[in-house]
Image: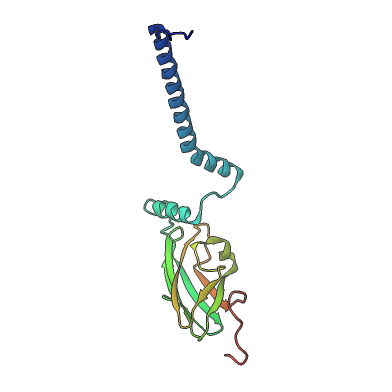
Amino acid sequence: MSQVPRPVGSAWVARLRRANLQMVGKLVVVTGVMFGFGYAMVPIYKHICEALGINVLSLSEQQVSRAGQGKVNTQVDRSRTITVEFDANARGPWGFKPEVRSVKVHPGEIATVVYEFTNEQDRTMAAQAIPSYAPKQATSHFNKMECFCFTEHTLKPGESKRWPVVFVIDPKLPKDVSTITLSYTFFEVGGKVPAAPKGAV
């Protein structure tokens, strides 16, 4: 003989509703905690890395940060003017030169100079540039925020490109240094493109 289902009592329904509301409340709290934790991860991570001396900012973040500081940068030493000269040396059939030969900047001031490159051969070539500085004591005070150096670049026959160098001179540069020469040597590297044919200039 089959049993007839009993009608659900109002007390049981009330308990079920309370249980459901408690579950929803717990889910809301868990979601809020997860969101807050995710939001706080970036500053927490940066603070930890700063405490450990690890640089966590990417190049683009550094540029944005420094560019924003430039508007209110109190680190610019306007009592001094440094002449920065640009030299370009090409080992091989390259057109390689800065758009300007020199600029005058204050220590702590961000400056940009553009270099022009042209592959003057009828073959694809890969090359890279290495910088050097004069005088030598200026090396540790010349900070490049963007540079084409130390990166291999491939140019097609006759192809030309323009690449910037964004830099700032540390205000701690010795007082007796008033001129800095930034010199680049641009040379062909092997590996990605065929070697020059025999007899090629």
Name the one closer to the observer, 96 or 126.
126
Q: Is residue 87 left or right of residue 14?
A: right
Name the one closer to the observer, 126 or 95.
126
Instruction: Spot the residue most to the bottom.
Output: 199
- In the figure, 40 relative to 7: above or below? below
Image x and y of residue 168, in percent: 47, 61
Write down the quadrant of residue 151 in the picture. bottom right
Is residue 6 visible in this depiction of the protein? yes
Q: Is residue 102 left or right of residue 172?
A: left
Instruction: Spot the residue most to the front.
Output: 1
Q: At 40% from the left edge and 11% from the top edge, which residue is drawn?
A: 13
Image x and y of residue 2, in percent: 47, 9
* Picture mark count: 0
Q: Is residue 48 left or right of residue 39?
A: right
Q: At 43% from the left edge and 11% from the top edge, which residue is drawn?
A: 15
Is residue 174 visible in this depiction of the protein? no
Name the one closer to the observer, 104 or 98.
98
Image x and y of residue 184, in percent: 54, 74
Q: At 49% from the left edge and 85% from the top edge, which residue is drawn?
A: 120
Image x and y of residue 197, in percent: 60, 88
Q: Name the quarter where the C terminus is drawn.
A: bottom right
Write down the quadrant of residue 200 in the picture. bottom right
- In the figure, 155 relative to 151: above or below? below
Q: How is the image coloured?
A: rainbow
